[in-house]
Image: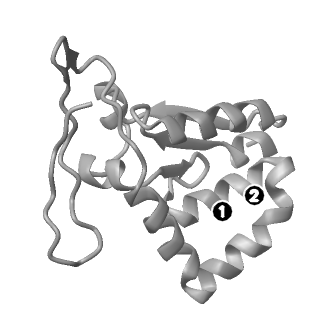
Amino acid sequence: MSIRKRRMLEVYYDSWCPLCTGIRSRLERWDWLHVLRFYSIRDQHVTERIPVSMDNLVDSMHARESSSGRILSGIEAVHALCMRVPILMPMSPFIWLSMKLGIGGKLYRYIASRRTIVPAGQCSSNGCELPERRNTQGDDSESHSSRT
């Protein structure tokens, strides 16, 4: 197996998330080694490719190492991306350290829980029905859906 094939990473991202699609665009430009493959979790056929529940896919980015089949999520997936994208490689030790100190995952979950979801193709003339946001903070605040 070639080095490039061993380094391949399948990245599962939320195409309804403007932050996620913006990051995907940058990563595609910076993927000089051509080792990243992006798949939107909003494509039904894609969700059949990876044995992860839709709730987990929505909650955090996932990645699968093509060589081993190992599935990574959240900050671990971010670290895997940094290890494969040359311009991000200098960040890798800091991401790794944040993971070991326990703050990387917390920061990732904080950002992921506050991202905006825009349900493409799910809007009517009355607006867009947004999916309910689950309470990820452990407090007593209510989940709600809203219209934009």
Q: Which mark is on residue 48?
A: none
The residue wearing badge 2 is 83
Residue type, numbered disc 1: His
Q: Secondary structure at mark 2?
A: helix
Q: CA distance from mark 2 to mark 1?
A: 6 Å
Give the residue displayed 28% in from the left and 17% down from the top: 121
Residue type, numbered disc 2: Met
Quadrant assignment, res 118: top left
Q: Quadrant of the N terminus?
A: top right
Q: Secondary structure at mark 1?
A: helix
Along the horizontal axis of the image, is 33 left or right of 25?
right
Front-most of residues 28 and 113: 113
Give the residue displayed 60% in from the left and 35% down from the top: 22
Front-most of residues 6 and 103: 103
Q: Which mark is on residue 79?
A: 1
Front-most of residues 41 and 140: 140
Give the residue displayed 18% in from the left and 11% down from the top: 125
Image coords of residue 93 (percent x, y) = 78, 73
Along the horizontal axis of the image, is 36 left or right of 19?
right
Residue lying farthest to the bottom in this orientation = 101
CA neighbours of label 1 inside 10 A, class few (<14), some (14 to 19), many (20+): many
Q: Mark 1 and mark 2 in contact (Cβ < 8 Å)?
A: yes
Q: Quadrant of the C terminus?
A: top left
